[in-house]
Image (cartoon, rainbow, N blue to C red):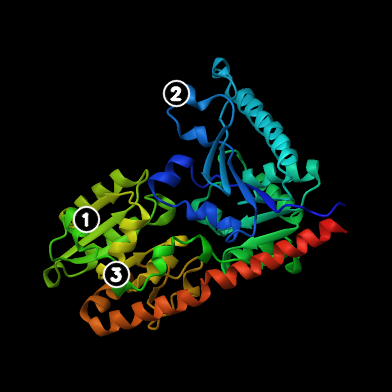
Amino acid sequence: MNEIQKKNMLVFDTAYTYKIICERNISALVTAKDINGYFDHVWTVHAVASLFCPPSSKLRYGRPIVRELNKKHTHIEGKIGRFYSLSWFPVLNFVLAQIDLILFLMKLIKTNQISIIRAEDPLFNGILGLILSSIKKLPIIIGVWGNQEAIRADTKKTLSPYFKWMWLERMVERFVLRRADIALAGNINNMDFVLSCGVKKEKTAIIRIGPAIYSKHFIEPDKRECGMKDLRSEGVNGQRVLLCISRLEVLKRVDHMIKALACIKVSDYNIKALYIGDGSEKDKLSKLAKKLGVSDQVIFCGNKDQDWIYRIIPCVDVIVAPTSGRVLAEIALGGAPIVAYDTDWHKEIIEQGVTGELVPDLNYSLMAKSIEKILKDKDYALKIGSNARERTLDIMNPEKINNVLINIYEELFALQKL
């Protein structure tokens, strides 16, 4: 094969639409993939972005939309259907839209000398990535940023709406992962899942999300802009503050902060419990808070951008983390004391009594006791918050992580030259 002249990459990632990326100021999740200029250009594809348009909207149909994020990053959004006139036949229309997207990307790969493909899950994104990788004879990297099997065990459902049966979803995961040139996992817990799918260990690597974290989260807490004004705008006036940053979905167990709050001796504390995020469970959470007699203490702040979040984290008394992904690293960098369930990857940052309070999974009454323990002991709160930040700075060091990732890419490019 001829020597690669440019390092250009195509990424399949359906985590966030272009609109959400801009509204929440989370473009770093996309732009970090160029590794500080290692890649000449990166194209990121959300294959079904128009799914989030209203059902009656004509914006759900048509050709892919191409937008420039910056000089090194282009964002492409696919459609849920190719033709508005075929909206009455959604399955056929979806297939036609995806075929159109694949043909569009095949031309893009050729025109722009794309040299590697990356997909950010082993299901829908992985299938599209594997199709193009096979057709264009390019190496493919598959990212796994959750323990898929653990999630299925918890929800008793498939992860993807495109799969009806768990056995079929598992089969596709294994098929895609075993054909990846490299499988990446965000932490040890996620890597356990990758290896359980039969992927050889030498074809895997743990790549933590440090480089994709909004850069201001790395600023020392006492050097950040003060977030007290932001908290006051949400109705906090001198109360002790609990904070949960999460999508408001059943999977995230967000109801457990309200349940824990109801267990705390309210007469001893003046507490406000804040949720940052939105989701289908919001109304149920409001009803639960009313049922448990704490509705006057719960505040739903909605979605906030990263600037708002990084300011307020050091100002709160306790962070409550029932089930957290990337957010756990962000809050730990803020130096606030954390109470987390012992689930998923939490123990990789939270060590009981050292970097936080690690509570047995689903035990919200013990979560309440841990919250009280922190509220009662300011020195302990400062110690575990500071320790959590130091540990997170170490394991989420962007430079170290990027160096590992560059070595992986270099090895793949070297194989292409043979």
Which one is earlier in the sequence, the residue at label 2 or at label 1? 2
Q: Is residue 275 visible?
A: yes
Give the residue at mark 2.
Answer: 57
Expressed as whole percent of the image width and height from the top left, the position of residue 318 reads: 28, 70
Left or right relative to 262: residue 306: right
Q: Is residue 336 visible?
A: no
| Circle 3 crowding by C-alpha within 10 Å: few under 14, some 14–19, many from 20 | many
Q: In 3D space, how far apart are the residues under numbered discs 2 and 1 (Cα atoms)?
A: 35 Å
- Who's the residue at 60% across and 58% down the image? 37
| Circle 1 crowding by C-alpha within 10 Å: few under 14, some 14–19, many from 20 | many
Give the residue at mark 3.
Answer: 314
Give the residue at mark 1.
Answer: 298
Residue type at tag 2: Ser
Q: In 3D space, how far apart are the residues under numbered discs 1 and 3 (Cα atoms)?
A: 19 Å
- Who's the residue at 48% across and 25% down the image? 59
From the viewer's side, name the closer residue of 18 and 178. Answer: 18
Q: Quadrant of the C terminus?
A: bottom right
From the viewer's side, name the closer residue of 85 and 346. Answer: 85
Instruction: Provide the secondary structure element on which disc 3 rests.
Output: helix
Expressed as whole percent of the image width and height from the top left, the position of residue 305 reads: 35, 52
Above or below: residue 84 compared with residue 308:
above
Expressed as whole percent of the image width and height from the top left, the position of residue 15 reads: 52, 47
Could you tell me how many numbered marks the image carries? 3
Left or right relative to 245: residue 33: right
- Who's the residue at 33% across and 59% down the image? 309
From the viewer's side, name the closer residue of 239 and 269. Answer: 239
- Who's the residue at 81% across and 46% down the image? 137
| Circle 2 crowding by C-alpha within 10 Å: few under 14, some 14–19, many from 20 | few
Instruction: Provide the secondary structure element on which disc 1 rests.
Output: strand
Which one is earlier in the sequence, the residue at label 1 or at label 3? 1
Q: In 3D space, how far apart are the residues under numbered discs 3 and 2 (Cα atoms)?
A: 42 Å
Residue type at tag 1: Val
